[in-house]
Amino acid sequence: MRRSCALLTISLAFAGCSVRMPWAPPLVTSPSGPALPRIPRDAARFEIDSVTDSTATFRVREARWVRKGLQSYVVDPQQRDALVARLRVIHRDSATATALVTGQVTRVKPEHFLLVVRPEEGWWHERRFWMGTLVGAIIGAGSVAAAR
């Protein structure tokens, strides 16, 4: 009986969890061409400090969530944020980050802006997980008390 109560407690504790796929920009279908990725409106905007043939350096300031491996986009503000290039962050220190160009439409310039999509937080940061854990613990403790 105690083993089944323990299993019930564990299963209910994780009932609030949900598994998510890694973030990818949603595709927007166009009648004139193939589906294109759409950059979310809540992407953080950074000024580009310097550009080389294959990298761009930008200041991250208080954006502590910027880390190695994040995908970013370069847009041209004079062309209504037209996509210029895709980049991946390859290095980050306390004040700046460097991103490698992985694909480009036109040459990246310091006048352009870099957009970085903030990654989703882990499942353990979600309220739903902790509510499921709390409900599972209460039901488990109640069933153990009732079994005695």
Image (cartoon, grey):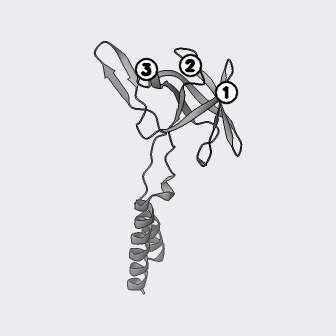
Write down the residue under mark 3. Answer: 79
The crowd level at tag 3 (other Cα within 10 Å; few <14, some 14-19, many 20+) is: few
- The kind of secondary structure element at disc 1 is strand
Q: Residue furthest right?
A: 93
Q: Quadrant of the N terminus?
A: bottom left
Residue 83, how many percent across, how many down? 47, 22
Tell me which amino acid carries mark 3: Gln
Tell me which amino acid carries mark 2: Gly
Measured along the vertical axis of the image, is residue 23 above or below residue 104? Answer: below
Residue at figure coordinates x 37%, y 16% from the top left: 34
Say whether disc 1 or disc 3 marks the residue closer to the N-terminus: 1
- The kind of secondary structure element at disc 2 is strand
Tell me which amino acid carries mark 1: Ser
Of badges 1 and 2, the one in the foreground is 1
Q: Quadrant of residue 85?
A: top right
Instruction: Determine which of the numbered discs, if any, sits on residue 50 in the image.
Output: 1
Residue at figure coordinates x 68%, y 39% from the top left: 96
Q: Quadrant of the C terminus?
A: bottom left
- The residue closer to the viewer here, 123 or 6, is 123
Residue 147, how many percent across, how many down? 40, 83
- The kind of secondary structure element at disc 3 is helix
Write down the residue under mark 2. Answer: 103
The answer to whether any part of residue 141 appears in the image is yes
Say whether disc 1 or disc 2 marks the residue closer to the N-terminus: 1
